[in-house]
Each structure stands twice: as structure tokens, then as C-alpha cells.
Amino acid sequence: MNLKTQNTSMHQGQLLLISLNKLEEAANAAHTFFMANPEHMEIQQDIENYKTTAGKVSLIDREAKPHMEDYTAGVRHYDKEEYGLAITFLERALKGYYAEDEDCQIMCEGPQRFEEHEYLEYKAGLYEAIADHYMQVLACKHDCVRELATRSGRISPIENFLPLHYDYLQFAYYRVGDYVKALECARTYLIFHPDDEDVLENAAYYEGLLEGILDPATIKPRKEAKALLRRHKLESHLLRVAAVGLGFTYTEPNYWKSVPSSISSEPEDGPRLSLTKKPAPKPDRELKEGKSNENVSVKSENVLLLLQTGGPLLYSDVKFVYNSQQLNGTQRVLLDNVISEEQCQELHRVASGIMLAGDGYRGKTSPHTPNERFEGATVLKALKYGYEGRVPLKSARLFYDISEKARRIVESYFMLNSTLYFSYTHLVCRTALSGQQERRNDLSHPIHADNCLLDPEANECWKEPPAYTFRDYSALLYMNADFEGGEFIFTEMDAKTVTASIKPKCGRMVSFSSGGENPHGVKAVTKGQRCAVALWFTLDPLYRELERIQADEVIAMLDQQHLGPSEMNINPKDEL
């Protein structure tokens, strides 16, 4: 059974359990499905409903791998500086890992598919067939490293998974005063990454602590890690030789990718001890940004920073409000006056004439929460309605013009070296449903990232389908403030710790890079209607928004017919 079928079965299973009134089992089935599909908003709401209905629920992932659960628990205790518990769980995770590796090796001994050949056309002598079979077995065994580092339901493995155990342990053992184990784990990590300067420095420091007590040279890397790595290298060598001899393609994956250090501690009279653990995701592009004194609700009050400006905002009426550092994140910016009050009102009028419930959400009127109604429309639809006379053409074109203005601002501010293309443009309003707002505990839009699947439990964001992995930057341009709730929030990777909260108002725009470095969501809209233009951008022209290309053609046709742009131009005369 493949992962998609398996996950679908688990989802259907929880619905069956609900019908049988087995709420605890249904909650576990829902949790199991959600762990493999963290982007599934309905399941997330189902889990919250179970908690409300059944009270305190201990959720169990029925497909969890025990060694992966122990690893996650160990990291969680490490982050809380509970080093004794971290050691217990991480050591148990290692024991489980090596046991699972042995099982994985045994399971590869069975029949194999000849992936390089069509069965009906494949013709080989006895020796070729035997060699081909054993190369398939060898490739399967070699892939156990990836299999054991991949969570249930996921496609991508956790980078540097096995070495990370030893990296966490070397520092945890140091913190509990067991310098022998600390040195042992540091040296074990170094057999995977012999050039890691941080851990080399740590190992030297531990050696100094042990001088006069015992000979540090007697402390060796762990035997099981050395044996696994030796076997893995031999498998790799055999596969490369066989690929040449048997004529098939083989590319060695980078199983032990080293991850830059993100946590450090500096003991007295000692070197800097750095843990090479998985940091929060960072975008490929960095910039220095400007500063503003306007008060926006953020986690930190330290805003008196001397920072250089980002790229120009292009338009004299656009007001800079807040930068990444003041929003406690990476690649973030908050701007005001991107459009005027009159333009907000005109855009709102055209929205009421073209929006349909569920548009842009596959027909679902309440895609993220049952307590709000979602309506939307695209640029092409607005222009079509304008051309047909169903809404004023000038108002329809305003939607096109302001989205282009937003694109140019984002491209300039983040100082991109290549063209930023539209990936999707959506005018969306969310309306609080009367009679459903009491004791709400959900969000209008759950915490997520725009180009990867956010996995708060693993502190990861998986850049794989069904995520829109081609998105690079996002922006939200707000149209009104006459509603209650609906604040836009940034969080940490845990999807709980809020780092910045932004209250929408007419002309305000928040923009940010689309990756796991910027988890975000929307608080519940409890009264009224909240409207915004949502924009997603890509640097890859292959993923340009098709409707935008068609809208460009409509605009060109209208210009040829001298029907003219909206009163809000984006001509250079408006720029600084």
C-alpha cells in the first residue's frame, strides 16, 4: 500500500470511528493522518473538536516509528535544557535506530523489481540476472539510511539524522558532567563530519577536561556507528562499480549533509561549545533593512537598532513601518499607504460584485474553519466582468494595477536580482458567521508556510508536494479594518509562539519570503468581514500564473481599444 492510499485509509477510518461513537480511537486516527498530512486544515479542526468534546486526549500516532518518537522527545527535552532526560531518550533512539537498521537490511533480501528494465523486453543471461538482482538488494540496503530518517507519511528524510543524535549527546553529556561520554559522542560525530570545526573544538576542550584523569586517546568512537559507516561506504563503492559494469545509472545521495550550527553555549574558561543542530529554515537571499518607530505588536521591545535600508519602495506615498528584525524574523516587511482609502473602497465595491463563495478554495465555502465564510476572485475574472459591463471596467482594472504595484514594491525592497513573477493573485474576503462565534478556539487560517509543509512536532518544513514549492515571496494587501479579530500573526516553527501580530487596515501590506522561516496564520474573525488581496510570487518563470498571463493579454487589448487604465497608474512619474 502506498503512502497516499495508506493516509487516505486512515482518514476514512476516523470517519467510521466517529459514526461508531469511538471518539478516542477516532482522535488517534485523525492525529495519525495529521502527522503525515500537516497541511490538512479540516483534520486539524477535527482534532481540536475532539479535544473540546472528550476533554484531555492523549493522542497517539499509530504509524509512528519508535526510534523517531524517542529522537523527537530527546530533542524536546534538550531544548528545555533537561539534559538528563534528553540523554535517556536519545540513547534509546539510537538503540532503536540500529535495531530498525538490522530489520531493514533483512527485509531487502527478498525479491526485487528490476527498475532499469521493462520485464517483457529485458533479456539477460543467468549471470547478468543474478548480478542485477543483487545490485537491487544492495541498493535497497544502502537506502535504509534514508528510510530510517524519514517520518511516516513524509517523502524527505531529516537531514543528517543519525549524526545529529551524537551531536546532541556530546553537548548534553558535557552539561551533566560526563566528559568521557561527551568526548566519545563528539568523536563519533566526527567520523561522519571530520572537518566540523565546532565539534573539533569541543572534542579538544573535553580532552583538556580529562587530562590527569585518564588518557583521552583511549576514548574511541562508538563501534556500531563505525561499523554502519564502513558498511555504507562499501555499499556505495560497490554500487558505483556495478553501475559502470552493468550499464545502469547511479547517483550517490548525500545522506550525511552537515547542518550549520545554530545553538551555542560558552562555559567559563573554555572554548565556545556549539551544537550542530537543525536551525530554523533560512531563505537563500539576505538583506539589510530599514527602521521605523511605529508601534506594532511584536515579541521584543528592542527596536532601537541602527539598521541600513533595504531596496527603494519606488512610490512616494508608500510608508515604511517595520522590518524583519523588528518583526522578529527573516525577510519580512510591513508597509502602509500602498493604496489610498478611496482605492480600498472602490476595490471593496468591485469585490462585492465579482466574488463567489468558495472561489479559490475548490468550492469550499469554509475551507479553514466552519465559523467563517470565504469568498474570492482572481484578476482575470475581475477584468472579464469589467469587459462585460457587470462591474465598472475602471474598478476591475484597479485590481490588476494594485497587484502589479505590490509586485514591484516587493521585488525592489527585497533587492532581488531577477524578475519576480506572479504565482497566484487572489482577492479574498472572510466573513464571521453569526451564531458561531461563542467560545471559538480555532484560527481563521491555521499556522502554515507558503512553500513547504509545516511540521511543528519535528520542527521541520517539508518542501515537497502538495506544498507550492515554487513560491518564493508572499504579500497580503489589506482593504479594511471594520471587523473584529483577524490579526495576521507570525510564529516560531512550533506554530504556537507568536513573534509578531499585525492588525490589518486599509492600504497596509505585509510581505515576506515564503519558506519555513516564516510560519504565519490569521486569528479568528469574530465579527464583520475582512478583505485583502493575497499575492504569491515566484522567481521561476515556469510557474508564472496562467491567469495573469491571460490578464496581461486582456489589458493589452483594452489599451489598443483606448479604454485606458484605472486612475491609479504605476508609471515612473509616481515613483521617487
Image (cartoon, grey):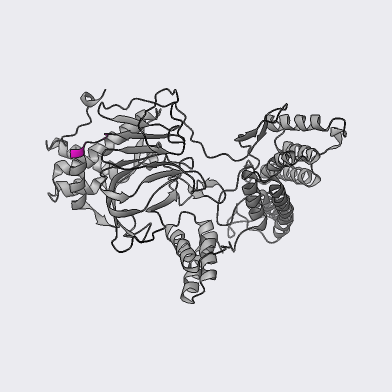
Residue 130: x and y in percent read 72, 55
Is residue 359 something that shows in the picture?
no
Magenta span: predominant SS is: loop
Residue 123: x and y in percent read 64, 56
Q: In this view, does 207 lie above or below 496?
A: above
Q: In the drawing, does residue 505 fall left or right of residue 559?
A: right
Q: In the drawing, does residue 553 fall left or right of residue 120?
A: left
Residue at image coords 12%, 38%: 563
Q: How many labels does the image show?
A: 0
Q: In this view, does 50 lie above or below 102?
A: below
Which region is colored magenta? Answer: 337-342
**Residue 514 among magenta residues:** no
Q: In this view, does 514 lie above or below 71?
A: above
Q: Of 270 and 257, which appears nearest the observer? A: 270
Q: In this view, does 268 lie above or below 357?
A: above
Residue 151: x and y in percent read 59, 53
Q: Of 575 and 143, which appears nearest the observer? A: 575
Q: On the image, which quarter does residue 199 sit in?
A: top right
Location of the C terminus (image quadrant) = top left
Location of the N terminus (image quadrant) = bottom right
Is residue 533 something that shows in the picture?
yes
Task: Name the residue furthest bottom.
Answer: 20
Residue 21: x and y in percent read 49, 75
**Residue 338 among magenta residues:** yes
Q: On the image, which quarter does residue 441 sit in?
A: bottom left
Q: In the drawing, does residue 398 fall left or right of residue 504?
A: left
